Image: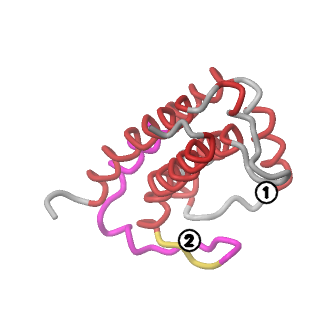
Amino acid sequence: MPGTLQEFLAAAIPKAAADLETAFLRLPEDKRGWSAMGTARTALDIVAECALLGNPKEIVRTRSFPADFDFGSFTGAKAELAKDWEKLRSLLHENAAGAAAMVREVPDEDLNINVEFPWGPTSIAQIISYPYWNMSYHEGQINYIASMLGCLG
């Protein structure tokens, strides 16, 4: 494969954000906050997660998972962000651009460094890949919602 992981991700992350937005906007406006089942995630919640987790710059810089990360507060932050599409859209693309810039700065020799996460060690290579992977994964979830609504095509 020509190029580096960092070059690939720097190009792929903003494209994944654009593709995620395209999938989201394919949904009828009145279905963007719809849940297929009572507790199933909505497209708005999914995009809010991607926007909030879109740039792991501080984890890469400090080589540590934030000790004060509060998963309960994160859930509230997603819900609040999901109320304002323009703010959500702006943060999604801002964090995608920031992540792309950040990955360009990661030297090859740092890719195998492990950072301790609550669920176990995670390499810098995995961490810088996360924004791309997460948005691509969630694009598929939103496309699945679209398929259930009959508006995928």
- Horizontally, residue 111 falls left or right of residue 115, namely left
Q: Secondary structure at mark 1?
A: loop
How busy is the neighbourhood of tag 1: few (under 14 within 10 Å), some, or many (20 plus)? Answer: few
Which residue is denoted by mark 1 in the rendering? 68
Q: Quarter-wise, where is residue 62 in the image?
A: bottom right
Residue drawn where x is 66% and y is 24% of the image? 29
Q: Is residue 1 magenta?
A: no
Q: Is residue 52 above or below residue 56?
A: above
Front position in the image: 133 or 59? 133
Rendering coords of residue 27 (x, y %): 59, 32
Image quadrant of residue 15?
top left
Depth check, front residue: 58 or 84: 84
Upstream in the sequence, badge 1 or badge 2? 1
Q: Which residues are magenta?
A: 96-119
Q: Decide if residue 5 is on the left or right side of residue 83.
A: left
Residue highlighted by disc 2: 115
Amino acid type, label 2: Val
Confirm whether the magenta stretch covers residue 104: yes
